[in-house]
Image (cartoon, rainbow, N blue to C red):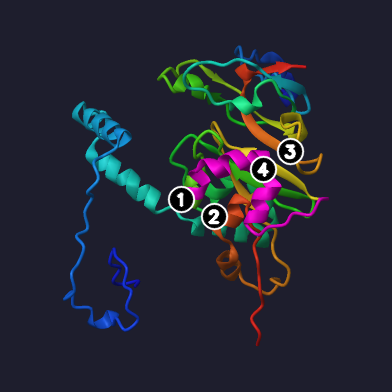
């Protein structure tokens, strides 16, 4: 379903995607619900701003393109570089934004970035209790659970229980530091480099680093494949 | 001239030098403004320590929310607050903590 991604479920196991000829009834791809209050508000404000030439439709499209180009793969590259280059790691921890910019990751807004290093003594977790502040320049859009109230409320109240639900057990002698991102600073967790990865290249390391590990809800895992 | 003697000759603008230093004990204000605010209500009136001064001065987001930007740049501080200071019944370790960036207008010295 990668090349031909229809917006409906195929339930037959014998369905051959290569001979997919659309002979079966197809649900029309459309929006049928009425727009909500905030959809209408956004449309009205956007149309007014365009009408008054404060910005153009092309600028909106361009900004969507900018956001679409940001994915967790960028953050993973930053993490992998920090693992293999000690001097870069120091600069990154000193000034997260400058460190990312060094790798060509631009910041299109006024936010700063603090990179939080997980160690054997400290485990970092990031959250935005007020809304959904997130290091978008390096990770792209946040996952839905990050924006929903259960995570936002519980991450600051019972972080250990939340982490357990992600399958992450933090030993009692490890300090948990929850960073609530609410104003001009965004955070990126620098996870611990897993054991057994000494022989891996920077690219191979980057492939191990996931979005959730850079939010701090899971560690980076490495299972050596059996030869 | 040495850097020190230059610094002695320079008069900084009002508000240019941070009011708080790393390690200072501070308390967040208790007030409940209507409208746009950036200090979550669960962190009002909590004691903490300045962990870091955010390197660039920034516009007060609460003013910015109403389109008022000019002249309102100030310092943001990364404040460390123990979880047990926030939640009396906190289930975790006493060393667990919260960090939040707070604009200077919300902070008072202890």
Query: CA separation, marks 2 and 1?
Result: 9 Å
Seen at 67% across and 43% down, the residue is: A94
Both on one chain, marks 4 and 3? no
Both on one chain, marks 2 and 1? yes
Query: CA separation, marks 2 and 4?
Result: 17 Å
Q: Nearer the viewer, mark 3 or mark 1?
A: 3
Mark 3 lies on a secondary structure that is strand
Q: Reading the chain from its start, which is encountered first: label 2 or label 1?
A: 2
- Location of mark 2 (residue): A75
Both on one chain, marks 2 and 4? yes
Answer with the quarter of the image where residue B82 lies. top right
* Magenta highlight on residue B101: no
- Location of mark 3 (residue): B97
Q: Nearer the viewer, mark 3 or mark 2?
A: 3
Q: Main secondary structure of the magenta part?
A: helix
Seen at 73% across and 38% down, the residue is: B97
Q: Judge the density around disc 3: few (<14), some (14-19), many (≥20) Cα neighbours within 10 Å.
A: many
**Numbered tag placed on residue A140 in the rendering:** 1
Q: Nearer the viewer, mark 2 or mark 4?
A: 2
């Amino acid at each position: 379903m990668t090349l031909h991604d229809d917006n409906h479920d195929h339930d037959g196991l014998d369905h051959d995607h290569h001979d997919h000829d659309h002979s079966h009834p197809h649900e029309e791809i459309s929006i049928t619900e009425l727009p909500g209050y905030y959809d209408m508000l956004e449309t009205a404000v956007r149309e007014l701003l365009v009408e008054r030439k404060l910005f153009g439709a092309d600028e909106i499209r361009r900004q969507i393109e900018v956001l679409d180009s940001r994915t967790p793969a960028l953050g993973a590259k930053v993490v992998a570089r920090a693992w293999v280059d000690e001097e870069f790691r120091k600069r990154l921890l000193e000034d997260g934004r400058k460190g990312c910019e060094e790798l060509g990751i631009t910041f299109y807004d006024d936010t700063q970035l603090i990179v939080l290093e997980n160690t054997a003594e400290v485990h970092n977790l990031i959250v935005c209790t007020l809304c959904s502040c997130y290091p978008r320049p390096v990770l792209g859009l946040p996952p839905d659970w990050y924006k929903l109230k259960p995570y936002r409320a519980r991450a600051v109240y019972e972080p250990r229980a939340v982490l357990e639900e992600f399958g992450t057990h933090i030993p009692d002698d490890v300090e948990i530091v929850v960073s609530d991102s609410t104003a001009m600073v965004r955070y990126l967790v620098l996870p611990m480099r897993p054991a057994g990865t000494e022989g891996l290249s920077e690219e191979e390391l980057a492939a191990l680093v996931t979005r959730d590990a850079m939010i701090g809800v899971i560690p980076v895992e490495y299972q050596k494949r059996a030869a | 001239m040495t850097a020190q003697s230059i610094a002695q000759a320079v008069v900084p603008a009002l508000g240019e030098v941070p009011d708080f230093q790393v390690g200072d004990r501070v308390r967040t204000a208790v007030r409940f403004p209507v409208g746009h605010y950036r200090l979550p209500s669960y962190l009002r009136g909590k004691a903490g320590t300045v962990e870091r001064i955010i390197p660039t001065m920034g516009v007060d987001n609460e003013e910015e929310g109403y389109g008022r930007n000019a002249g309102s740049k100030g310092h943001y501080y990364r404040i460390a607050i123990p979880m047990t200071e926030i939640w009396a019944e906190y289930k975790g370790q006493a060393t667990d903590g919260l960090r939040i960036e707070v604009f200077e207008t919300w902070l008072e010295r202890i």
